[in-house]
Amino acid sequence: MNPPLPGTELRDTSTAALVEGAVAGLGEIILGKETQLRLCLACLLARGHLLIEDIPGVGKTTLAHALARTLGLSYQRIQFTSDLLPADIVGVSVWEPETGQFRFHRGPVFAQLVLADEVNRATPKAQSALLEAMEEHQVTADGQTYPLSEPFFVIATQNPLYQVGTFPLPESQLDRFLMRVELGYPEAALERQLLLGRDRRDLLTSLEPALSAQQLLRLQGEVPRVHASEALLDYVQAIARYTRQSADFEAGLSPRAVIALLRAAQAWALMRGHPGVLPEDVQAVLPSVAGHRLAPRDESRFRSATAVGRHVLESVPVP
């Protein structure tokens, strides 16, 4: 048996087994989207939040529910509409005559995995209530601060085609999402499996957790400890510098975006069993991390986040 190539040794076989078990479970529900599933897991391991932007009916809601079941997390779905109030997200204080006091009734945001469905259909006021929870991992109501569950993960969805009656997320709020992914249509053979197989909702009820919340917290704690060499950091900073200096983009990657890129690459390296972050780990996550943060001056040249990421990677050599 040949020895493994340098940089491909398993860092932790138990970590690899947990990740592969989660990917396998998710793959039974969401067919043919292994890359997107791995990106979702990397986003969660990096303690980030996920934006899924795609047309209706491709499995966005099903993916969120499947992630919650696979990872053993409590789950709540919030349907964002134009009349949604912050209290519908956070919760509300109710007067109790028996005690003569107000008692806070927690809203759906106190779940470990929260699906913000069609997030751009709510008003900015409702969106900002979710923003505090995403950024601070806490909510404030009636002058009191309440910590959220750990782990805490928001998956937001939106439809990129129909913008009538919507409130587009501002750049400051888009930046709070560590990654944006698209699912796309299934291949013909996999679509045939969907037509002939069981309903995805029935499969969800039988999906067993691949790991516990405590195991997930342990993996999240390992991500920042994945080694990133000086050369790797030079590569990440070169990518950031190119986006800031290039005439192709309205603005470059912010320092927060660069930190997000490194954390996502560390999570990807951990999942792949690499002893340290490799350039290909950065390349694997860059389109999903940078695509919604970089606004092209000429949108006809870059029609997708993948195209933006490919352009940046082709323009920045590996040191």
Image (tube, rainbow, N blue to C red):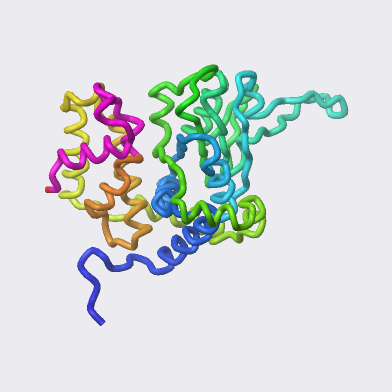
Location of residue 192 with respect to 261 vertically, above or below: below
Location of residue 253 with respect to 264 vertically, above or below: above
Q: Quadrant of the N terminus?
A: bottom left
Question: Residue 135 location in percent, x, y?
Answer: 46, 32
- Which residue is depicted at the point 25% across and 21% down? 297
Location of residue 248 with respect to 114 vertically, above or below: above
Residue 315 in the magenta stretch? The answer is: yes
Question: Residue 77 location in percent, x, y?
Answer: 62, 38
Magenta region, residue range: 289-318
Question: Residue 148 location in percent, x, y?
Answer: 57, 39
Please tell me which residue lies in front, 304 or 142: 304
Asked where in the image residue 309 lies, by quadrant, the reply is: top left
Q: Is residue 113 left or right of residue 307?
A: right
Residue 301 in the magenta stretch? The answer is: yes
- Which residue is depicted at the point 57% across and 38% down? 115
- Which residue is depicted at the point 59% across and 26% down? 140
Please tell me which residue lies in front, 168 or 226: 168
Q: Report the residue that reaches farthest toward the right.
A: 98
Question: Residue 277 location in percent, x, y?
Answer: 26, 54
Please tell me which residue lies in front, 127 or 83: 83
Location of residue 263 with respect to 54 vertically, above or below: below
Please tell me which residue lies in front, 205 or 184: 184
